[in-house]
Image: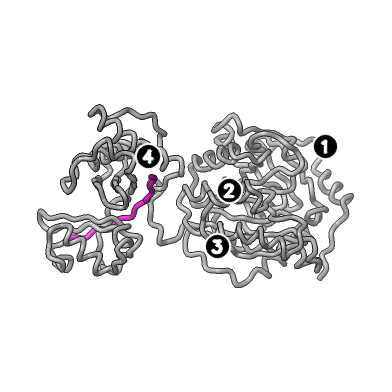
């Protein structure tokens, strides 16, 4: 059935019916209404027609892949819903009966240029023909308080469509929810970084989702545009957000909301997301029939898979990983030269107790490895301590000398708490590290060891017994206790 849109005039009449005063009062507080800017243009301005169109899109979103884990972020298009709505619906379909009640919605500004990020809240209610969506005042304020580059600019949101067109879908699949609307101005790397860090810093629960709004390449023939889109899609499928950001800066991938996508996905990854699935890809030519000049659209989901059992506190941002690597190297260098351990200015998250191993390699060969399996001291102190011990106190090797510093590769493994194994079937090679204890004997192997040597589960267990000084089949002994753990593993030359 052809889509029928109410006229812009009717949309204006409907919008204006709320009254001339933009400030309304409910039973709890005053709030300001952000009126629709593109009702009757990007989507129907009549509630009945809009509801019909949205539900039609959702009904046609079929054969979605199974998402075996916790959904943390979506990527959706924001063109007129006649062109992109059937793509966006594949993402929004996943939110039906999800229990989501807060949405952090991010996009790029099209109509008003500015530096930084604009969060249009707190104290704002966004209106669509389907009703009002109130902002989450606390989360909005926390974003604004995070940096002086995050502002509240009404002008930036007044005529912008990239966030607004998402609301009718969200209202349909979620019902009542609260909104955190964030708009990137000029999409500079420093601004993207600020938004990413601010989102990562937010303490959110599993009833909150982040959404990035973007269209992809614009107005190329579909066959030529695919060359740009396919590179970006490959980055998503590999969860390589740094490469995606590089391609965007080099214009090898084209997205009008690319900064929002990078910021949201970096934050999702820092909060534990480890997989992305492409739900639907298409372009405007699928609707118009004209493939000579199209705009491309992608719906995708980022989620934390059930195989990823890392607790939240074990998830580290790229900056935190880099800080820990610098701490390890600086500690080794300072200790070898002065026999003193340096002091560090570090972020609050790295002050939380943490268990870790520091592994040193030289020219591809192990040069030292020491760790703590219990979180008995702040994580940054654990790394500093283990770095020194790996360099000078691993009994298998002579102490590292200052002449070797330039050739050292440092790898850090931040560990989750030990989990007692009740069945060997629980152990997954490539994900789990192992500890085996029997009497006074104890052996530990990190997850990457089994992967490096290509061991199966039995070989992994046998070699952990060997590490403990036990017979290879000691893991079968009823007096032996087996623990598994996971690790965030990262390194730098």
Q: Nearer the viewer, residue 392 or 94?
A: 392
The reply to whether discs 1 and 4 touch (Cβ–Cβ < 8 Å) is no
In 3D space, how far apart are the residues under numbered discs 1 and 2 (Cα atoms)? 44 Å
Report, in whole angstroms, how far the alpha carbon at label 4 lies from the one at label 3.
30 Å
Report the residue marked by disc 4. 324
Dot 3 or dot 1, earlier in sequence: 1
Q: Quadrant of the N terminus?
A: bottom right
**Which of pointers 1 and 4 lies earlier in the amino acid sequence?**
1
Which of the colour schemes (rainbow, by chain, secondary structure, one colour) is used?
A: one colour
- In the structure shown, which secondary structural element does the residue marked by tag 1 occupy? loop
Q: Position of residue 388 (x, y in %)?
A: 25, 38
Q: Earlier in the sequence, mark 1 or mark 2?
A: 1
In the displayed structure, 482 sits above or below 397; it is below
Mark 2 or mark 3, which has the lower sequence index?
Answer: 2
Question: Disc 3 versus disc 1: distance between alpha carbons?
Answer: 45 Å
Residue corresponding to mark 3: 277
Badge 1 is on which residue? Answer: 20
Which of the labelled discs sits on residue 4, or is there none? none
Cα–Cα gap, marks 1 and 4: 56 Å
Looking at the magenta stretch, what is its main secondary structure? strand
Mark 4 or mark 3: which is in front?
A: 4
Q: Which residues are magenta?
A: 481-493
Indicate the quadrant where residue 426 lies: bottom left
| Residue 102 colored in magenta in the image | no
Q: Are marks 1 and 2 in contact (CB under 8 Å)?
A: no
Q: Nearer the viewer, mark 1 or mark 4?
A: 4
At horizontal 31% and vertical 52% (from top left) the residue drawn is 364
The location of residue 185, given as percent across then percent down, is 68, 39
How would you rate the neighbour count of disc 1 (Cα within 10 Å): few for under 14, some for 14-19, many for 20 or more?
A: few
Q: CA distance from mark 2 to mark 3?
A: 18 Å
Q: Residues within 10 Å of mark 4 (few under 14, many from 20)?
A: many
The residue indicated by pointer 2 is 245
């Amino acid at each position: 059935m052809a889509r029928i849109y109410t006229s812009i005039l009717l949309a204006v009449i409907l919008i204006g019916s709320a009254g001339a005063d933009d400030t309304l009062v409910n039973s709890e507080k005053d709030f300001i209404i952000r009126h629709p800017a593109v009702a009757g243009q990007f989507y129907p301005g009549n509630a009945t027609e809009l509801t019909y169109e949205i539900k039609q899109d959702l009904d046609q979103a079929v054969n979605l892949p199974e998402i075996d884990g916790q959904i943390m972020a979506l990527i959706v298009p924001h063109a007129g819903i006649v062109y992109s709505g059937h793509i966006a619906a594949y993402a929004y379909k996943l939110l039906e009966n999800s229990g989501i009640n807060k949405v952090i919605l991010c996009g790029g500004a099209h109509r008003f240029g500015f530096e930084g990020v604009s969060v249009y809240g707190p104290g704002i209610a966004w209106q669509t023909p389907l009703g009002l969506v109130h902002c989450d005042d606390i989360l909005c304020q926390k974003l604004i308080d995070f940096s002086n580059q995050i502002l509240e600019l009404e002008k930036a949101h007044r005529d912008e469509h990239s966030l607004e067109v998402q609301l009718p879908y969200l209202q349909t699949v979620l019902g009542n929810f609260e909104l955190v609307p964030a708009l990137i101005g000029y999409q500079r790397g420093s601004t993207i970084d600020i938004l990413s860090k601010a989102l990562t810093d937010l303490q959110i629960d599993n009833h909150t989702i982040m959404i990035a709004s973007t269209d992809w390449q614009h107005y190329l023939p579909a066959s030529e545009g695919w060359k740009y889109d396919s590179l970006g899609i490959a980055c998503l499928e590999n969860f390589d957000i740094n490469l995606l950001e590089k391609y965007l800066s080099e214009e090898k991938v084209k997205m009008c909301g690319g900064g929002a996508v990078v910021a949201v996905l970096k934050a999702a990854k820092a909060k534990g997301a480890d997989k992305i699935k492409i739900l639907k890809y298409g372009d405007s030519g699928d609707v118009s029939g004209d493939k000579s000049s199209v705009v491309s659209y992608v719906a995708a989901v980022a989620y934390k898979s059930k195989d990823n059992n890392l607790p939240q506190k074990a998830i580290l941002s790229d900056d935190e990983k880099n800080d820990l690597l610098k701490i390890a190297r600086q500690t080794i260098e300072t200790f070898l030269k002065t026999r003193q351990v340096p002091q560090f200015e570090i972020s609050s998250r790295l002050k939380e107790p943490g268990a870790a191993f520091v592994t040193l390699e030289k020219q591809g060969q192990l040069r030292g490895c020491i760790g703590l399996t219990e979180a008995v001291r702040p994580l940054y102190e654990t790394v500093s301590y283990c770095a020194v011990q790996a360099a000078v106190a691993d009994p298998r090797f002579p102490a590292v000398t200052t002449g070797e510093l330039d050739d050292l590769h440092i790898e850090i493994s931040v560990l989750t708490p030990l989990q007692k194994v009740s069945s060997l079937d629980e152990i997954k090679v490539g994900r789990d590290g192992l500890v085996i204890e029997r009497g006074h004997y104890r052996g530990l192997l990190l997850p990457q060891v089994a992967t490096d040597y290509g061991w199966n589960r039995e070989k992994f267990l046998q070699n952990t017994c060997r590490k403990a000084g036990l017979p290879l089949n000691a893991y079968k002994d009823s007096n032996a206790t087996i623990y598994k753990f996971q690790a965030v593993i990262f390194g730098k030359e």
